Every structure is written in structure tokens, then in C-alpha cells.
Image (cartoon, rainbow, N blue to C red):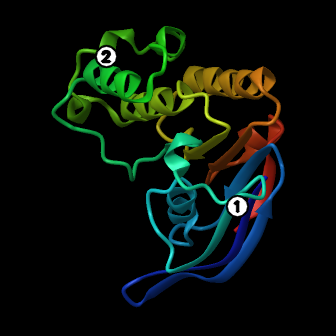
Amino acid sequence: MIEVIGLNKQFSDNVVFKDYSKVFSDQKGCIEAPNGQGKTTLLMMLAGLEKPQSGSLLFAGNRLSTPTKTVAIASDRIALPDFLTANQIIDLSVNTLGCDWPHSLVNGFNFNAFLNTRFEALSSGNQKKCQLILALMRKSPYLLLDEPSAALDQTSILYLLSQLDAYLADKPNRQIIITCHEPAVFIEHGFKCISL
């Protein structure tokens, strides 16, 4: 369970969250809100990649001193090294995080043919696949996916859904929170719609 208590966040004069509190108790949650309402910012703060001005973020009732060890995230806002190939980026993550090389994810997303392509030269769909592979391979207790179906073809969306099921079947105490503009496919797959 993720709990947000009294969260305040603003960029210059733009107040994104003011004394925001919310409990995310569902194992599979889909945050739905218009653009610019703070969905991605919230995920980035939960992952420890952005800091709030104030407030508390609790995971199973605890503050995480190093969320990046417990929370995996896939988001376009995270800048991956454009000049490296997808293979090099995955290798770097495997070596840094001590994960197994994600052969099955690469195969499942039909990504083998793009491993030797520089990240900046990948299509938006293949960049998304790379981000998802990096997040899923960590097998973290908390998985945050920002617009995971954006730019993906139907086959890849179906594969992603199967992987999310497997992710939870492996360890039922895990939690997945996604953001999505078109949540129908995820709601059909058991995600609970959450208003921001």
C-alpha cells in the first residue's frame, strides 16, 4: 500500500499539489487525470527521483530512505543516455542493479532486432519498450509505469499485460501503479481506476 500525506509540490508559480493526500491500496491501480494535473510528477516523487516541498510518502506504512532500491519506474521523463545502444543501457542497468539479463522480456517485446540501435534512433514505441524492460527486470515490490501503452502496438500491449499479471503472481504483495489516458484496456485487466 502506498500512502501520500499532505503532499505539496510546485514548479515556480505552478502549484501541482497542495496538501494532497491519497491512499493507493489496490494491487493494480490506474491513475486517470487530464494532462498537466501531476500524474507523472507524482510517480517521479514516489520513485524518489523528484522531491516534494513537503509531505510524506509511505510504502506499507514506512518512509523509504532509498526509494530507488524498492521502487521501479518507467517514464519518458527519465532521460536515458541517447548515445548508448539499447543493449549498452540494459547492460549498464544489469551491472548497476545486480539484475539478471532480461532475455525473456527482450524476446517477448520483440526487441532483439533493436538492441544495437542507439537509444535516440529508436522509434517512440521501441523507446517505450526499452523503458518497460528496464523497469520490469528489477522485480521491485513497487512498479510505477507512466503511460505504459503509449506508442506500443497491440501485440506489445498484450505482452505487457501478461507480464504485469506474472509480476504479481510471482509475489502477491507487489503493487503496480500506472498512469493512462485510455484506461479501458487496463481496467478490463483488473486495474482499479483512481482519480488524481
The mark lying in front, picked from 1 and 2, is: 1
Q: Amino acid at mark 1?
A: Leu
Identify the residue at image location x=70%, y=48%: 183
Is disc 1 surrounded by few (<14), some (14 to 19) or many (20+) residues within 10 Å? Answer: some
Residue for badge 1? 58
> Residue 38 occupies which quadrant of the picture?
bottom right
How far from the left and from the top, in percent, is residue 140? 61, 34
In the picture shown, does residue 188 fall above or below 196? above
Q: Residue at x 73, y 38 (%)?
A: 185
The residue nearer to you, when weighing 125 against 51, is 51
Q: Where 99 falls versus 152 (above or below)? A: above
In the rendered structure, are the residues bearing label 1 and label 2 in contact, judged by CB atoms less than 8 Å apart? no
Count neighbours of disc 2 (C-alpha within 10 A) and say few if under 14, some if 14 to 19, many if 20 or more: some
Give the x, y percent position of residue 107.
49, 9
Residue at the limit of the structure toward the bottom, as seen here? 13
Badge number at residue 114: 2
Query: Quick check: 11 left or right of 172?
Result: left
Q: Looking at the image, tell me whether mark 1 or mark 2 is earlier in sequence order.
A: 1
- 146 in relation to 194, above or below: above
Question: Separation of disc 1 and disc 2 at Cα?
Answer: 38 Å
Helix, strand or loop status at disc 2: helix
Dot 1: element: strand
- Residue depicted at x 55% and y 50%: 67
Q: Residue at x 52, y 16 (%)?
A: 105
